[in-house]
Image (cartoon, rainbow, N blue to C red):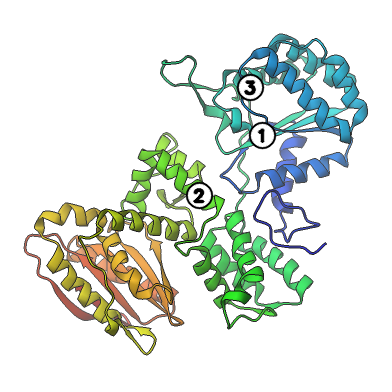
């Protein structure tokens, strides 16, 4: 069977090009060897199920009985009644073992005939472990499908009680239990009765901390590229390409595979310059553009937008961080920040919340731009000027000056509070029809006191950088020039552009070319 890059479901090394996760697996296996109970809580499509499958295959090679369950697709009825849940759990265990360990499966059927409540379920587990005469490890995937349910929390309480009894008295108990899902099982939110306030319950406080970094490092991404290159005979600078993929994805497993899958399966039909036997950095850039195009849809992006739409506080936070350049500190006790990290939308950098990766940064910007443009439909015109492009290159000096004129004509002092929040989106909306179809712009979030955001624009094979910032005085301005100069060095550029939103009373729209270090910077105040 021909191998492919996989972006749906778990990965299998015999069918898919995969990152070598040996290092991560060894860390997880160490927890199992220590008889730990723990939860793998990571965003959607982040490698949780793939890790459980790897554990299942490897533990089966040892004298360990592995019970692999999933709450995906079992419906809600099982959680509505204690008898249904307890009998259903026994049936799930029997079904899981019927193909892999039929003898133990028969033991389950025999011992589980009279299980009808949590007390008898607890007795069943002890008797089952004792009869097996070998260590039992339980893997449960998609546990948050039932996370808002008292019965499941009570079940976790049984596991906790047996874990403690085993530790104190040597009583029978599962050697290790691994739960996998998006939400943190340690702090499940539970509505006990209809109309009663939401409470917190922590039946999983026996769990060991799970600190394994499930994202892919550039070195790990390189192993997947090597697998593909060796299999297909493709020439590539694997280390350089892995770095570029990580630059765009921050190692989000789904996005890493999707970047590669785009190149391997779609670029030939879309890019006339594509050479299937020689991957370059330009191919990675093309895949990023293809992945973040406004009309492209995937369940991963749909899930991200759904989470923003369903949580207004998170939407406001992400907008503040992404669009407005606000600084929001990351604290363990901030539930909104933690929710953004749980969903994989936010990450921590330098103690502050940032958008988790550049793919999401671009998608969120496009999504919020579209919502703003719809709200402003008929009020503003962003029609492109033919002189914005010369010899297939952007004339950014003219673009910024025309934007300055546009702002004078369409916005007044009464719009100051709106522009302080939304000015960057207004500019991106102005820029989008100019570069649409021939280039792309992605935002580079910068954590710092100036609320500045760099926009990297690629057009006609050339990259430029536009920094947008809010005027905070000359001292901040000088510091911002130094930071822009450093970023231009990172991009190997000598020319940059600076768009300043000035809301001071004595402001005067102006523009000028500045010399800073060895750079030329065109600055425009609006």
Identify the mark nearer the N-term, 2 or 3.
Answer: 3
Dot 2 corresponds to which residue?
Answer: 302
Name of the residue lying farthest toward the left: 506
Inter-mark Cα distance, 1 to 3: 11 Å
Name of the residue lying farthest toward the bottom: 391
For image coordinates 52% across by 72% down, the residue present is 285
In which quadrant of the rendered image does the C terminus lie? bottom left
Inter-mark Cα distance, 2 to 3: 27 Å
Q: Quadrant of residue 252?
A: bottom right
Q: Position of residue 259 (x, y in %)?
A: 59, 64
Taking the image as shown, residue 292 lies to the left or right of residue 47, namely left
For image coordinates 70% across by 49% down, the residue present is 10
Give above or below for 452 relative to 59: below
- Helix or strand or loop: what does disc 2 sit on? helix
Give above or below for 153 relative to 445: above
- Helix or strand or loop: what does disc 1 sit on? loop
Q: Position of residue 4 (x, y in %)?
A: 73, 62
Q: Quadrant of residue 507?
A: bottom left
Q: Position of residue 517 (x, y in %)?
A: 31, 80
Taking the image as shown, residue 452 lies to the left or right of residue 360, namely left
Q: Position of residue 228 (x, y in %)?
A: 73, 68
Dot 1 corresponds to which residue?
Answer: 73
Residue 133 visible in the shown view: no
Residue 452 visible in the shown view: yes
In which quadrant of the rendered image does the N terminus lie? bottom right
């Amino acid at each position: 069977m021909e191998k492919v890059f996989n972006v749906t479901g778990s990965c299998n090394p015999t069918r898919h090009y995969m990152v070598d996760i040996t290092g991560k697996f060894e860390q997880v296996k160490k927890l199992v060897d220590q008889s730990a109970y723990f939860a793998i809580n990571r965003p959607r499509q982040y490698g949780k199920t793939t890790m459980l499958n790897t554990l299942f295959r490897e533990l089966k090679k040892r004298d360990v009985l592995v019970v692999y369950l999933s709450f995906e697709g079992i419906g809600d009825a099982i959680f509505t009644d204690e008898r249904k849940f307890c009998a259903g759990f026994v049936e799930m265990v029997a079904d899981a073992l019927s193909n892999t360990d039929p003898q133990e499966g028969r033991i389950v059927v025999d011992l589980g005939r009279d299980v009808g409540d949590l007390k008898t379920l607890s007795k069943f587990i002890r008797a089952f472990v004792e009869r097996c005469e070998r260590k039992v490890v339980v893997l449960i995937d998609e546990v948050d499908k039932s996370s808002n349910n008292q019965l499941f929390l009570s079940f976790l309480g049984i596991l906790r009680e047996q874990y403690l009894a085993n530790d104190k008295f040597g009583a029978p108990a599962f050697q290790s239990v691994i739960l996998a899902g998006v939400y943190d099982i340690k702090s499940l939110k539970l509505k006990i009765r209809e109309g009663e306030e939401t409470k917190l319950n922590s039946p999983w406080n026996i769990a060991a901390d799970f600190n394994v970094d499930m994202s892919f490092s550039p070195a790990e991404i390189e192993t997947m590229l090597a697998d593909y290159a060796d299999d297909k005979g493709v020439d590539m600078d694997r280390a350089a390409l892995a770095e570029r993929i990580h630059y765009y994805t921050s190692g989000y497993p789904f996005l890493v595979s999707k970047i590669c899958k785009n190149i391997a399966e779609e670029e030939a039909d879309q890019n006339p310059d594509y050479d299937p036997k020689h991957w370059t950095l330009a191919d990675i850039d093309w895949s990023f553009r293809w992945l973040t195009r406004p009309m492209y849809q995937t369940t991963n992006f749909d899930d991200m937008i759904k989470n923003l739409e369903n949580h207004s506080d998170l939407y406001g936070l992400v907008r503040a961080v992404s669009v407005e350049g606000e600084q929001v500190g990351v604290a363990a006790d901030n539930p909104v920040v933690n929710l953004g990290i749980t969903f994989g939308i936010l990450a921590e950098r330098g103690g502050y919340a940032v958008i988790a990766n550049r793919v999401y940064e671009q998608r969120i910007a496009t999504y919020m731009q579209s919502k703003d443009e719809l709200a402003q439909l008929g009020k503003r015109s962003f029609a492109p000027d033919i002189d914005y492009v010369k010899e297939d290159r952007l004339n950014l000096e003219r673009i910024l000056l025309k934007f300055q004129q546009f702002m004078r004509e369409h916005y007044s002092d009464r719009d100051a509070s709106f522009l302080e929040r939304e000015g960057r989106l207004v500019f991106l909306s102005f820029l989008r029809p100019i570069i649409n179809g021939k280039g792309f712009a992605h935002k580079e979030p910068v954590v710092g006191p100036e609320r500045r955001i760099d926009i990297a624009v690629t057009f006609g094979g050339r990259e430029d950088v536009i920094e947008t910032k809010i005027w905070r005085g000359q001292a901040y301005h000088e510091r911002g020039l130094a930071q822009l100069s450093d970023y231009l060095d990172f991009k190997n550029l000598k020319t940059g552009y600076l768009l300043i939103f000035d809301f001071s009373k004595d402001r005067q729209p102006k523009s000028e070319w500045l010399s800073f270090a060895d750079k030329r910077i065109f600055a425009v105040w609006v």
